[in-house]
Every structure is written in C-alpha cells, then in structure tokens.
Image (cartoon, coloured by chain):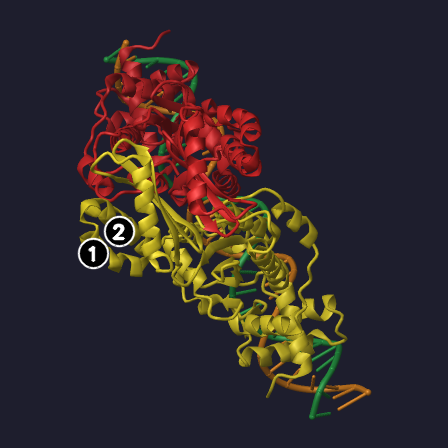
Chain colours: A yellow, B red, C orange, D green
Amino acid sequence: MAMDERKFRILQAIIDDYILTAVPVGSRTISKKYGMSLSSATIRNEMSDLEELGYLDQPHVSAGRVPSAKAYRLYVDQLLQGGRISQDDEQQVRAHFAGRTRQMEDVIDHAAQVLSSLTKYTAVVLPPTGTQPKIRNIQLVSVADNAALVVIVTDAGVVRDSVIRVSEELDSDALYSISRSLTAELTGCSLTEAVERIPQMMQRMSEQAQLIEGVGAVMHEHGEDIRPHVAIGGTANMLSYPEYSDMEKARSFLSLMETRDRLADIISQSGEMSFTVRIGPETGVPEMEDCSIVTMTYTAGNGQQGTIGVIGPTRMQYSRVLAAVNMIGRQLTQLLSDAPGEDIPRLE
Amino acid sequence: MAMDERKFRILQAIIDDYILTAVPVGSRTISKKYGMSLSSATIRNEMSDLEELGYLDQPHVSAGRVPSAKAYRLYVDQLLQGGRISQDDEQQVRAHFAGRTRQMEDVIDHAAQVLSSLTKYTAVVLPPTGTQPKIRNIQLVSVADNAALVVIVTDAGVVRDSVIRVSEELDSDALYSISRSLTAELTGCSLTEAVERIPQMMQRMSEQAQLIEGVGAVMHEHGEDIRPHVAIGGTANMLSYPEYSDMEKARSFLSLMETRDRLADIISQSGEMSFTVRIGPETGVPEMEDCSIVTMTYTAGNGQQGTIGVIGPTRMQYSRVLAAVNMIGRQLTQLLSDAPGEDIPRLE
DNA sequence: ATTAGCACTCACTCCGGGCGAGTGCTAACA
DNA sequence: TGTTAGCACTCGCCCGGAGTGAGTGCTAAT
C-alpha cells in the first residue's frame, strides 16, 4: 500500500484542520468540511492506512487522528518545494526597519520583536558571527589618569572594548603613537593570531610591556568569550496555545528560553542550508519534543552570517511562519549589506 | 478597638503561614501550629477584629482569612524597622562576582541571574544612570576608507559609539588631530551641551563641517535614546507559584516582562530611599495587582545610580527577599566603586 | 476575657450516568 | 473492486448529587 494522491489530500486536510484547532480530527470532519465527495467511512479506511504508514497517531482508540512528525515533515517539504511563500506585510515591515542608524543590538532585538508579533510564536535572532574577524585598527584612548580604553576595530565592526590600567601616566599623544604601532603591527590578524604575537611585541617594546600585555588580555578575553547577544521576542505568546496549558511544560520551555547560551546553540545548529525546518524530535532537544523550529541564515555585508528562528508548537502554521522568516531574513540581509550607504550598523 | 500586641502576633502568624502555603488560613491552624496558648475560638474573635481593621480578607464566608495589602505593609515596615536582615550566602555570591574584568552588561545580567536564583522570584536589574555624564575624550578611529568610528568617553565610561561617514579620505593622523581639537573643546560638557556647541564649531572649522555634524548627530542620538539594557532573570520562576496557575495572568505578566521599557519605568520609580517595597496596588501597575516589588538603588563609582528589584507574589518571603536584595545591592555598589583597582567595568 | 459547643456554609472531591464523537467491521451496492 | 451505509463498541468529557471537611459566627458556660 503506498501513498497516492487521494491519501495525500486527506492527510493535508487533516494537518490543516489540526493546525487550526489543536484537536484530534475525525473522519466525518474531513468528509464534510473539506469538500471531498467521499463518505466518512471511506476517509476512515484511508486514515487507517495513513496511520499504518506512520503519518497519523491516535491518542486513544475512540479519538480522532493527530498528524505525526513524519506528516509535518512531508507537509513542509511540499511547502518548501512549491515555494508558495507569500510576501504580504513586506511593506510595513520594511518601514519598521527604515531610517536611523542603529546599533546591531537594536536591529536584532527589533527583528525578534517583529518576527514574533508577525507569527504569534516565539522568535529568536542571533547576530552575525563567522570567520574570525580581522583587526583593522587598535586605539588606546585616555579615560582617566591611569586608565585607558582599548578599542579594537575589526572588519566586523567594533569588538567590545575594555578599560585597562596604564602604569605610567601616558598622555594622549603617547597613547596615540602606541596605538599606531599596534595597528601597524596587527592589522589583518585575527584576534587569536594577535594574541600569539603579543609576547614578541612585549620583548621588542619592553618599556610598554605592561600596557601591551593588557591589550593582549583584552583580545584574549574577547576572542574566547564570544557570547553574542541573543534577541528573543514573544515568549509569552506560547502560553496562548493549548499545548502549553500544562504549567510544567510551560515552565520548562520558559527556562530554556532563559538560558541564552543553550538557546543560541540550538538555533545556530541550522545546517548549511539557508532554510531549515526541524520538527518535534528533529530538534534534538528533549524539552522541545512538541515544538518545531524554523530557522534561516542571513548575511551581513562582511560575509558574516546570523540566524533568525521561530519556535512554535509542531502544529504551527508553517506557511505563514516560513513566509515571515523568509521575509525578515531577506530584509536583514539587505539592511546589513554594506551597500545602502547611510547606515553602517556594527557588531556590538 | 485598636491593634494590640496579641492581635499583632496573630496577624504575623497568619501572614507567615499564608506566605508559606498560599492557602487561606483558619483559626485552628494558628491556635495549634503557632504555639499560642489560645483556643481557636479566641483566635476567631481576634481574626474577626483584624478583618474589621482591614488587615484580613475573607475569600468567602466559610474559608480562612488572607492577609490584605495593608497587612503586608505593616509586616514589612516591621521588618525594615527591626533591620533583621541576615546575610548568609554573602560569601558564595561574592565569589560569583569576583575576578575578571567585565562589561557592565555582563555584571547586570549576572546580578539578575543570581538574585532570581537566590529568591526564586523574578529579578530585574537596571544599569547605573544618572546625572548627564560629562565628556572626557572624543576619538575618531578610521574603520574603512570613508568611514570612521566615533568613540565618546565620558565619566560614566564609554557612551555607545557609532560609525559615521567621512567625506574626504582622511588618514588616521588627520583624524587624530581632529579628535584632539574636539576633545579640547568639549571636555567637561554634557552630551546635550556638546550638541548645542556643534553649530559654532562647524562654522569655525568649516572644512571639517560635515564630519563635525556627524559627531554631533551621534551625540544627539545617544543623548536622547538612553534605552538602557534591562537585565531580567527568573521570569519562569513565577509559573511555579499557584497565583499564576491562571494562564491568562501568567501571560500578561510575561508580556509585561517583555516590554522592557515599561518594566524599566516601573522598577526605576523607586523613590529617593535606598530601599523600597511596593505591595500589590502600591505598584500602580494593574497587571501587578497581586505582586510586590522590592527595589534598592545601588551606586557606581561615578555617583550614578542603578536599581535592582525583585518581583514576586504579594505573599513573597519578604525577609529573604529583602536580605537578598540588600546583599546584592551592596555587593554591586562595592564592585562598581572605583576603588578596587584591578577592574573598571564600564557603562555599556 | 476565654473557651467549649453547635449549627451552618461552602468549596472541593468523588462517582455514576448520559452524551457524543469517533472507530472498526461487515454487508450491501455500483 | 472500490465505496458506502449501518451498527456495535469505546472512551473521554460533562454534569449533577452526595459526602467531606475546614472554617465561621454565635451563644452560653467558665
């Protein structure tokens, strides 16, 4: 027994109905609501077959059927293939993003907000990261008598800056000249390469050894601890769905959303493809057994890649979510491309 | 009929019990569990009086009594007066914060996390803000051929920096000399004062007019839009409490936690006093009718003030929360004081 | 002033019956 | 051979009533 055209249409109808109502759907519903000229009995037979094929589950013997993860998989594959992704609210959203120079962090936060309010699910946005950024410029700025600010500019924007102590009282000219040597020496290096070079440099410019060591420490710290800011929107949305009427589930979901590190891992595991849909168990996260995650990567001007994602119940409205994710993703790529001229958002 | 010693002790017992169990407490419970040598009947009479005085509410006629906001107020006033604030886990927490130079943002996030896990409620931390920070140094750093990064250092640390376009191709030496003039001119000004001076400066140094205008724009933007990063921890905790078994309530609470701007407003409304406890309606927030908020201000080295707060149900464990807030608050103040020498966290 | 006793209230739980949506199977039909 | 009507059966869910127990208020005795 194989999957024929009719079975497929019935399956589709079941999924549609279940997505809408979150209630196990019965044969009569399909036969009546979804204009097939088939009696409920026939549908029943087909449903029985579909269950055998693994596309449907039955919560208990006298209940309707519920689509399985396998069914959703088929469903979204169809969606993705067909490319039926509309792009309605595009205009409004574009307006939201237009104007003002923004910090990367703001862009990210905003994207998460828009995406969640568009889909009514939970949205997660990771900032662009990627190949080790290359150093472009190093500046020491005097902050106080014995403290200086280290600003490291890379091709990804400004890497976080830090204050270090300077032993002697160097005036700003002195700092500037040191900045120039450092820049000359390290331009084009990645942070880790730069850290490796620090010892030699300390020897060569021994009178500034302490200062240079400080700079090295800053680089080291930022080279490792790239704990990017993760933007989340609409966690509260999930509570509106019946699948989270169980408090315990809701709690564990929310806890997961709070541990940003783990969340970032989960979201960023979205393969090489630009579009990824992970359904239920495919997420690989026990707490998300009945969630699906739709992710897409976007690209900033410097080639770095970020990820946006939507998390919802497995019965999410895939076509709408796919459309929204696709739109926001493209929008971000465009916004962050070097081209536009007036704004250069930077990496936080 | 007035509040006498015995009534007060009974009220205290009722509050203690209710805080523990979240269940309306009856006269028998008090008479038995709380070693008063009084019969339940006597307690009943007293409870009736306390209800008349407005300290107790009765959900329905045959249920026990529940403390009113007025009762909690009395309770915490007593707590605050007595100064009975223990400081047990102080050591562990101090260890958490020790070591490593940190960004202000990290410190804030971390404080929220610790505070929420310590109290099992929701914690909110606002970064220090305060009197307009004074400019200490302005640096233009070359980022690309026709773009420069403006870094404005104030006594509050680094104000967010932005990239601006520079029309001509200025090399880094040229940028440095402009930086020096700008610094000389504007040191000691607040951001808004500096913005006012921009027009004159544009006239005076007309060949760099566009550049200076750009710098002015950056200042203006950051002078206004001080949307500080708000750190939140433990929102999921709230779902463990029976008062939030109602999904609708939980949802509205979480939504509130998501609108950081509003949340920041609410938290920062904590009067002049260093310690504030707002109970139920006192919060002034409809969504928080049965929440209480405990806040405390802390002070950074430069005199700027930040706020930390804990949000929980009105029946929160005030003494523990007060202790925790107090401890973390003092800890932050100490950590952020200029004194310690090795770390200077900075304003994000 | 305190307490024992008593009648009364009322939320909560448990339980059995009825309901209805849904299934699987069988037999009839095109 | 595929489709359909009919039927018996299952089982979750809702509803109403009885029972329970915690709690109160009042009264009378100590």
Residue B211 location, quadrant: top right
**Whole-percent x and y of residue A186?**
33, 56
Report the front residue among A145 and B290: A145
Q: Is B275 positioned to the left or the right of A206 in the image?
A: right
State the image coordinates of residue B326 (x, y, percent, origin top left).
Answer: 28, 28
User: In the image, residue A260 lies at what x, y percent?
Assistant: 39, 52
Q: Residue at x 29, y 27 (%)?
A: B301
Q: Position of residue A36 (x, y in %)?
A: 75, 73
Q: Where A6 sits versus A133, above or below? A: below
Report in which chain the residue with disc 1 lies: A
**Circle 1 residues within 10 Å: few <14, some 14–19, many ≥20:** some
Task: In the rendered structure, find residue A199 and report the number of the disc placed on it.
Answer: 1
Whether residue A180 is visible: yes
Residue B63 in sight from this viewpoint: no
Q: Which residue is the site of mark 2?
A: A216
Who is closer to the viewer here, A181 or A20?
A181
Instruction: Name which quarter of the figure residue A156 lies in.
Output: bottom left
Q: Please state which amino acid type lies under the numbered disc 1.
A: Pro
> In screen coordinates, is B297 left or right of B343?
right
Q: Is residue B73 depicted above or below A311 in this figure? A: above
> Where, by quadrant of the figure, is residue B345 drawn?
top left
**Which chain is home to disc 2?**
A
Residue that lies at the very extreme toward the top in this rendered image: B1
Q: Is residue B206 rendered to the left or right of residue A217?
A: right
How far apart are labels 1 and 2 at the CA level? 9 Å
